[in-house]
Amino acid sequence: MKMSHLFAPTLREDPGEAEIVSHKLMLRAGMIRKLAAGVYSLLPLGLRVIQKVSNIIREELNRAGAQEIFLPVLLPSELWKETGRWDVYGKELFRVKDRHDREFCLGPTHEEIITDIARNNIRSYKQLPINLYQIQTKFRDEIRPRFGVMRSREFMMKDAYSFHATEECLQKEYKNMYDTYCRIFDRIGFKYKVVNADSGIMGGGFSQEYMVLADTGEEEIFYCEECAYAVSSEAKKSDNCPKCEGKSLNKTRGIEIGHIFQLGTKYSEGMKATYLDENNEEKPFIMGCYGIGVGRTAAAAIEQSHDKDGIIWPMAIAPYKVVIVPANSEDPEQMVMAKKIYGDLNHEETVLDDRPGRLGMKLKDADLIGFPIKVIIGKALKDGKIEIKLRKSGEVKLVEIGKIVEEINDLL
Amino acid sequence: MKMSHLFAPTLREDPGEAEIVSHKLMLRAGMIRKLAAGVYSLLPLGLRVIQKVSNIIREELNRAGAQEIFLPVLLPSELWKETGRWDVYGKELFRVKDRHDREFCLGPTHEEIITDIARNNIRSYKQLPINLYQIQTKFRDEIRPRFGVMRSREFMMKDAYSFHATEECLQKEYKNMYDTYCRIFDRIGFKYKVVNADSGIMGGGFSQEYMVLADTGEEEIFYCEECAYAVSSEAKKSDNCPKCEGKSLNKTRGIEIGHIFQLGTKYSEGMKATYLDENNEEKPFIMGCYGIGVGRTAAAAIEQSHDKDGIIWPMAIAPYKVVIVPANSEDPEQMVMAKKIYGDLNHEETVLDDRPGRLGMKLKDADLIGFPIKVIIGKALKDGKIEIKLRKSGEVKLVEIGKIVEEINDLL
């Protein structure tokens, strides 16, 4: 992509509306724009990050045996009344009537809908287990939407629902999802903890949250240094580790990006969703559910990794991995070399900053947007060399022209 | 994917709710399920078709220089009041209030929103032209939703909006989109016509519709046999071709899957969306817009290509391209061979029908779902041969075991 063509309206100043660094930087880097309180448009760079996060999630879930579906946004009130959540959700539920005065809500989560699909389409234990997921826009009328895409009213989420004939089968899939989530967040490059959590409005049994560690995190986490034990502040019952003979717990802060639940039969019993077991008896499905905040994951990556100049993307979810910056766009030699390198690299992951203007302005934009690799074609070109600068470490290398493409590809 | 694991609840009987063949077959093949009138869930096979259509659209639009974005569903009434469409759209607009009684609609189209983004982020003619697109869920409270995903109230659409400083530039991009749409529909494998159309509620100037030819199409099309001229019934002014010295027009039926518009300044003037031209004067953006019904495209493919046994997918958008069917799942030799071939083919595009049960039932499901290539491992295995049957032509080949993978890959 050529920078002169890319729709990335960067801002010099911190926007007044933004309270936290990810919100500020996503606005300044031209990734998102506010349409209404808690409602954001994704511009090209922001969407690319979301798509990369989504693709990592999709690949790992498919590999783990889950199947992708896509459920509606408009959910009929009847199903929500079956579980009683039509009232419980209160004002957080956006409610809408159609032209015939039928009531719907805009889906904030899809337990009712998927349970309805299961009861209508799964008859026998032989069709179990099954795990269905979707990556989709959700709606919650938050009392205080804030922090950009971190807590918005319309947001992208991955939600998955599993159905089982036995508790053991649920446990096995829960463990499968636990591991899959670790693989997803490892691939993104997060520092995170998995904490035992309170299940809240979702109900059901045991649940765990994936917390990205960041000083700016909204949540307090308590963890044991000796073992893997970690717990959220709501679920914490003691100041000491229950696993390590009373070692005292340490405190840190985190951002919740994923949550896995053992729902049990809460929804299937409420909605009379049953299958026939080996003895031809009707049994309620045993369920699990598994969420990842996709937009939140992007924002959390920024909270965990930025500096005063801008975003420092992990390679896996950077909107583009490489930016090529000719120091002087009016120098024909530099531009020819810039275009040659651009031609030799993967266009999908490379931006050529072909804009007129000063080098300083281009490097400022590059750091703000957070491309992991800057390729700067400047004065050293006369000596047959090109500069590579890494966004994260600040490391600078002067590389011979003939080796530049190989060197960049090695860094990817 | 193994068929025993795939969530594709096929139905033996025609569902009563379905009036047209694509709706019937998508329900019967376990691709979609109705949640409410005009509101459908996409199950794994249905979603895969939608994703393949989306990816073709995305690839061709990126290649044509358009940039992908993602706009919200919740659209504030203020913007819609600026253009007057808050009232014009009437009951077709789903309206919703948030907890503070602010009015929103669920986006049926995004001219207002994209024009707002342009006026806030594009200052200079130097930033033009630009073409921004999204693939997203849209909402229209149709007075009579019907035909499954063909005319639903919640549906997947690709919409694109271009901004220009001159009329010539709009014409050039319009032609670019015209050609890009042809490439998209050619790649899918459609027989279609491009007809001059009436612009309706979108307003603005010239527009053209892409019509997939199908006897079951909702629209009448009139076309000239001598030249490329075609016109919709609403836009038709004469029984004779205006280009070919009065040749009389022929009639056929079609399904609208795409529509390209020269909007001009209708929205930019209404919303005071301006840029600074070379003389530093404020001028309203000149706009184009370009839509494709993504769900509709899938349904239209079925209307154009099916038989009494089920769907005949074009290769490019088949949910999976190959199904491997062992005639007898209790024959170890057949199962070993089936698994071996499955292992050698691209898993992403292959289903192994490992279910117990009769061959007839498996072949019925295969034809219903419409896999383009069936690989049947049956009695001929003893003679070292495997049967390949093509869904479209019905052609049957007996292929030697050693050549089967090569033969299948050649057909893809």
Image (cartoon, coloured by chain):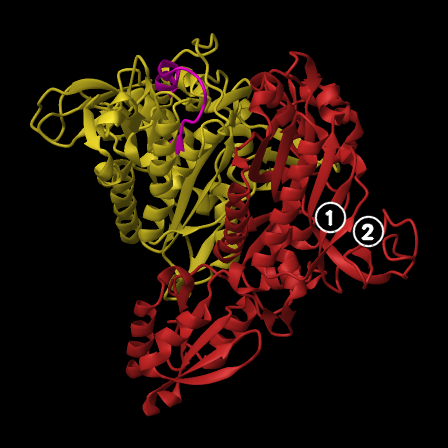
Chain colours: A red, B yellow
Q: Which residues are magenta?
A: B351-365
Q: Chain of mark 1?
A: A
Label 1: few (<14), some (14–19) or many (≥20) C-alpha neighbours in 10 Å? many
* Residue at the image position 90 percent from the left and 61 percent from the top: A247
Residue A216: which quarter of the image?
Answer: bottom right
Q: Is residue B333 left or right of residue A358?
A: left
Q: Which residue is mark 1?
A: A209
Spatial CA span between label 1 and label 2:
8 Å
Give the residue at x 59% y 61%. Answer: A189
Is the same chain shared between marks 1 and 2? yes
| Element type at mark 1 | strand
Residue at point 34%, 80% (across, down) = A403
**What is the x, y in percent for residue A17?**
69, 58
Residue contact between numbered discs 1 and 2, judged by CB atoms under 8 Å? yes
Q: Quadrant of residue A277?
A: top right
Q: Amino acid at mark 2?
A: Ser
Relative to residue A401, is residue B138 depicted above or below? above
Chain-order first, disc 1 or disc 2: 1
Task: Label 2: state its secondary structure.
Answer: strand
Q: Chain of mark 2?
A: A
| Viewer can see residue A231 | yes
Q: Which residue is mark 2?
A: A232
For the residue pair B18 and B95, the one nearer the viewer reads as B18
- Amino acid type at mark 1: Glu
User: Is B62 displayed left or right of A315 in the figure?
Assistant: left
